[in-house]
Image (cartoon, grey):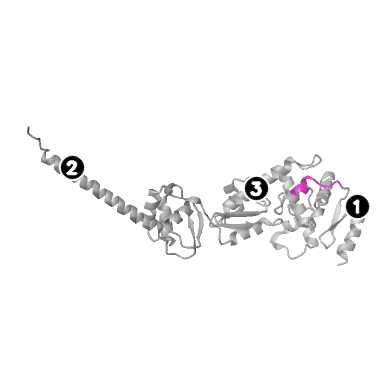
Amino acid sequence: MAVKKKPQNQSTFGRTLGRVFLLLIILVGALAIWLYQYASTPLEHRVQDFVVESGGVKKVADQLVKQGVVDQALPFLLLARVTGKDKLLKAGSYTISSPLSPWQLLEKLSNGDTTTLTFTLIEGWRWTDFRKALNSNPHLRHDSALMSDAELLAELGISALSPEGLFFPDTYHVDKGSSDLKLLARANQRMQSKLDKAWAGRSQNVQLKTPYEALILASLVEKETGRAADRPLISGVFANRLRIGMRLQTDPAVMYGVGESLDGRLRKIDLLTDTPYNTYTRSGLPPTPIAMVGDAALKAALHPASTTALYFVAKGDGSSVFSNNLDEHNSAVRQYILQK
């Protein structure tokens, strides 16, 4: 019986295909070995900070090259895609404190192991104090620096006449290199949350009509208080005056209205010069808060002490003395103010 031979062209095709597969296996193996070596070899860089902005893996790789974190974009890009990390990279500010391998760098970026900064807002700060601190912080991106107050409020989606008092004083942790608008938004959201909660739990006898009025009154209490225990009493005096239509006559509001032109202590002419914040010439609350307030001032504004006092004066030691009538008040002024 004759044995059929395979056609010559089919045999040649099979051998060629086998060689191609073998070559592919060799190439894939070589690539895997090269990629493993690349992934596990520490990058030759010292301690440094760098920033990753939002974007695809190619954009991230280019940013890393530009900042000197990696030498070439292609190997890093290939490693990210082969390992599936290319979709997980997170924007933020990072610090390399010791030599990292490309794989460790990918892990850092995909885990969002960012470097944060601490920024503290102080109770009693004015908006100008807050903005100055923002603009002078070297680790923030100053997106709001050239904005007017109106433009900034619009950018944050806040409907208000002024940014004064709309940000809660606290310590915030944000990524280095992040936008100052992000910090502002967080501080505003925190203040709104605090104000809503305080307003919901206000005393029944509070005469204030809106949460914003409570914020204004709290700012007056904040600036008038030298001793924490006096806050409810100071709020009680203001509540009594508002109830009977008596002008608040609070110096910090007048000083706020005078603004940058104030030279040291208030003068008589300052008390007589009418501004929207002059509580000696105008009745009721000022049009906006005059400072940032904390929990204690909010609580005092919405839970004033039950008192018959209509006056108070600072004693010089941080505390205040309270009086029910003008004669008592004038006596306290002579004792604690005029004798100085």
Q: Residue 297 carries which label?
A: none
Which residue corresponds to the image point at 20% horizontal and 44% vertical from the top-left? 17
Magenta range? 297-306
- The residue type indicated by label 2 comes to Gly
Q: Which of marks 2 and 1 is in front?
A: 2
Q: What element carries label 3?
A: helix
Mark 2: few, some, or many residues within 10 Å (few <14, many ≥20)?
few
Task: Name the residue beneath numbered marker 3.
Answer: 190
Q: In which quarter of the image is residue 320?
A: bottom right
Q: Where is residue 240 in the image (x, y as percent from the top left)?
A: 84, 46
> In the depicted view, which residue is nearer to us: 226 or 271?
226
Closer to us: mark 3 or mark 1? 3
Can residue 24 be seen here? The reply is: yes
Q: Residue tagged by mark 2?
A: 14
Looking at this view, name the residue that lies furthest to the bottom. 340
Q: Where is residue 39 in the image (x, y as percent from the top left)?
A: 40, 56
Residue at image position (62%, 60%) is 133
Q: Is label 2 in a helix, a strand or a loop?
A: helix
**Residue indicated by mark 1:** 325
Work out which quarter of the rendered image holds the N terminus and state it.
Answer: top left
